[in-house]
Image (spheres, rainbow, N blue to C red):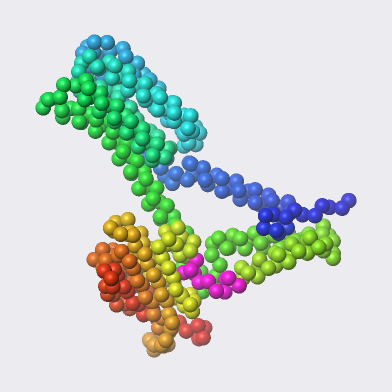
Amino acid sequence: MTSALPEENTLGVIVGGKSRRREADATRRVIRAATPRRSSLGTGFIGIGAAVVVGLRAVYGFVWFLGLWDVYPNPYPALAAWLILLVTLVATFVTARVSGDLLPDWAFVLFLLGLGAAVALDLYAVWPLHNVGFYTTAAVTAGMGLLVVVTLRRTSDILVAVGVLGAALATAMIVNTSWSAETASGQVTTLAFAVLPAVIGVFVVSGFRRLVQVELDRVLVQSTVSAPRFAVGMLASEELARLDLAAEELLDSVATGKVKLPLDPKTASTAASLATELRLHLIEGRRETWLYHAITESDLLGKSVTLTDKGSLAGLLDPQQRDGLLSTAWLLVSDSAKASATRTVALVIGPATSSVETTAGRKISVPIVITTTGAPRNRVDPATWEAIGRVGKYVDSTENQSLRVEIQALVDNPADQ
């Protein structure tokens, strides 16, 4: 029985059953890594903490409501508001945890409807008392209840929801309450308790996510510090691994007789394309240094750092000098959020023009010039100067109100190795 020829993947290379299984396993790993529970990067624990805070606030508000029971002309609408609010918060929390820290649109809509019903009933119960800020309880807790979903929904969703809630409460206070020196402070305080927790939670979670993403990006590109002088990057390495697997599959098919010799035109064309792809990757690996890959494969550095290294001299730096240079670029760029202007960094390396005799032997002096925009010297983090010192001796100056650093890095002569 003649075996069918192996299939081709989208790259035009031959893929057998084993490779398809490996690709399927890799795909499943990527999907699992992309699930909210894993991509939340710790925000799930923030969500649990927020739920605990909301629970404590609910206990406080409910006890306050029970203390005012006799004051209400009709306390049962307020009691219904509390029941709806508690059911909504508990159901949303359980739904999110069961579904893997994920809150679908329909669940979020039901959550907002539950909060809206609780706020409406609570305002209805306190309306005859003409002091919304003092007597409302469930409505305030409903505003803080948005913290339950602060890690599960987009920032805009939370801000719009809390904005609508704040506007509703403010309107009710203006229309219903007799404002005076005695009542004004209570209205403002109640409105702040209802609106500010969710707003602060949104900014805390957003800042945490940005921090973690930046640090993850730093960890990924940090691996290039120990790379050879010329090498392929992380993305190219993955592509090269796939091409290598496809080549092994082709050779195995020929060795086992699944593919007959001579190769048919289609299979021969595919093999030629595979060989071309492999050669191109190997050639690229002889031209691009670790620093090139560190910059181009980083979301943060790739947008703000430009590299000029015609002689590929960055590959001559030792691991300590590489770490110092990469840290310098990273610190200069990552501090842009603290500066008034967006920072850019230009790295110019070489050409090497002289050799220096040291106690460790003869070294080559490689000039490195770092030019920035939007980075005044007095706004540079002290850790940046420490990182620059690990690269070599430097002289700093100010150019167009930004920092310029000239470094002389001593490296081993590749001819002596």
Q: Residue at x 37, y 52 (%)?
A: 211
Q: Residue at x 37, y 25 (%)?
A: 115
Q: Residue at x 29, y 31 (%)?
A: 166
Q: Is residue 392 above or below residue 219?
A: below
The quarter of the displayed image where residue 174 is located: top left
With 36 as the anchor, is 163 left or right in this view? left
Q: Where does residue 5 sit, x and y in percent of width and height?
A: 80, 54
With 339 as the anchor, is 239 left or right in this view? right
Q: Is residue 136 above or below residue 4?
A: above
Q: Residue at x 70, y 58 (%)?
A: 12
- Residue 219 is a magenta residue: no
Q: Which residues are magenta?
A: 283-293
With 283 as the anchor, is 132 left or right in this view? left
Q: Is residue 285 above or below residue 206?
A: below
- Residue 292 is a magenta residue: yes
Q: Where does residue 60 sit, x and y in percent of width and height?
A: 27, 25
State the residue in front, 96 or 156.
156
Q: Is residue 47 visible?
A: no
